[in-house]
Image: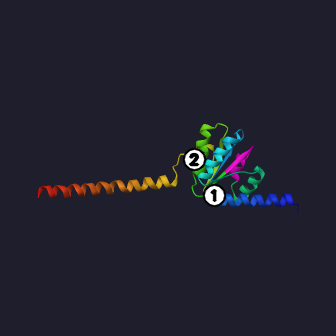
């Protein structure tokens, strides 16, 4: 077996492992971004714990087929980058979508979140979902509000009884 073929097989295995490990994956067309814009995008993704790579489409297609993500293959045309979110499934979509608003050269193509394939519009909807931490904070806040009201009510009753005595 030639060394080139071995390298390609190893790269397919690497892509498959990343796709299996990631909770959220977003594919984007990056052609036309300047070096500075690409560096800024990579920095934002890295800060959010998102891995950003550019692979050959043929290798990504092979990995996707082996994992049963045949529906993603139609989106793998032209220069396509891949963002893997391991901790937060919506982080890649959120960061890439926000970046694309200011940088029209970046186009969202498709995504995979927990095994479900989304088109461009689906990825944009995913981007509107707050991060896990924000959702937990909102949930805890909704628990706290009724308890706070109960404490205030009990305190008011207690103060009223004290003033009556």
* Residue at left offset 59%, top offset 52%: 47
Q: Which residue is mark 1?
A: 22
Is the N terminus in the top left, top right, bottom left or bottom right quadrant?
bottom right
Percent across and percent down for residue 118 are 62, 48
Q: Residue furthest bottom?
A: 1
* Residue at left offset 28%, top offset 57%: 151
Question: Quadrant of the rendered structure where residue 124 is?
Answer: top right
* Residue at left offset 77%, top offset 54%: 59
Q: Is residue 121 visible?
A: no
Kind of element beneath mark 1 = loop
Q: Look at the numbered discs 2 and 1 and tell me whether their residues touch, using CB distance below 8 Å.
A: no
Percent across and percent down for residue 159 are 19, 56
Is residue 77 a member of the stretch shown in magenta?
A: yes
61 or 102, which lies in front? 102
**Mark 1 crowdedness (10 Å alpha carbons): few <14, some 14-19, many ≥20:** many
Percent across and percent down for residue 131 are 52, 52
Percent across and percent down for residue 72 are 69, 50
Kind of element beneath mark 2 = helix
Q: Is residue 36 left or right of residue 150?
A: right
Q: Is residue 24 left or right of residue 78?
A: left
Mark pair 2, 1: CA separation = 15 Å
**Disc number placed over residue 94 in the picture, else none:** 2
The answer to whether residue 132 is above or below residue 77 is: below
Magenta span of residues: 70-82
Is the C terminus in the top left, top right, bottom left or bottom right quadrant?
bottom left
Question: Quadrant of the rendered structure where residue 4 is?
Answer: bottom right
Q: Is residue 147 visible?
A: yes
- Specify the color scheme: rainbow
Q: Is residue 73 left or right of residue 133?
A: right
Is residue 44 a member of the stretch shown in magenta?
A: no
* Residue at left offset 72%, top offset 47%: 76
């Amino acid at each position: 077996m030639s060394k080139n073929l071995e390298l390609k097989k190893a790269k397919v295995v690497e892509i498959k492992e990343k796709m299996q490990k990631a909770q959220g994956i977003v594919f984007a067309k990056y052609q036309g971004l300047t070096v500075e814009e690409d560096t800024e995008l990579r920095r934002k993704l890295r800060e959010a714990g998102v891995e950003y790579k550019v692979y050959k489409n043929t290798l990504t297609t092979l990995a996707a087929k082996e994992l049963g993500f045949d529906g993603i293959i139609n989106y793998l045309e032209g220069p396509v980058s891949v963002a893997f979110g391991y901790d937060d499934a919506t982080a890649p979509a959120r960061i890439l979508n926000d970046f694309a608003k200011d940088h029209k050269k970046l186009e969202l193509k498709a995504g995979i979140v927990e095994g479900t394939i989304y088109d461009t519009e689906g990825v944009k909807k995913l981007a509107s979902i707050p991060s896990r931490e924000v959702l937990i904070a909102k949930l805890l806040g909704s628990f706290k509000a009724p308890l706070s009201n109960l404490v205030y009510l009990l305190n008011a009753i207690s103060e009223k009884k004290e003033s009556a005595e």
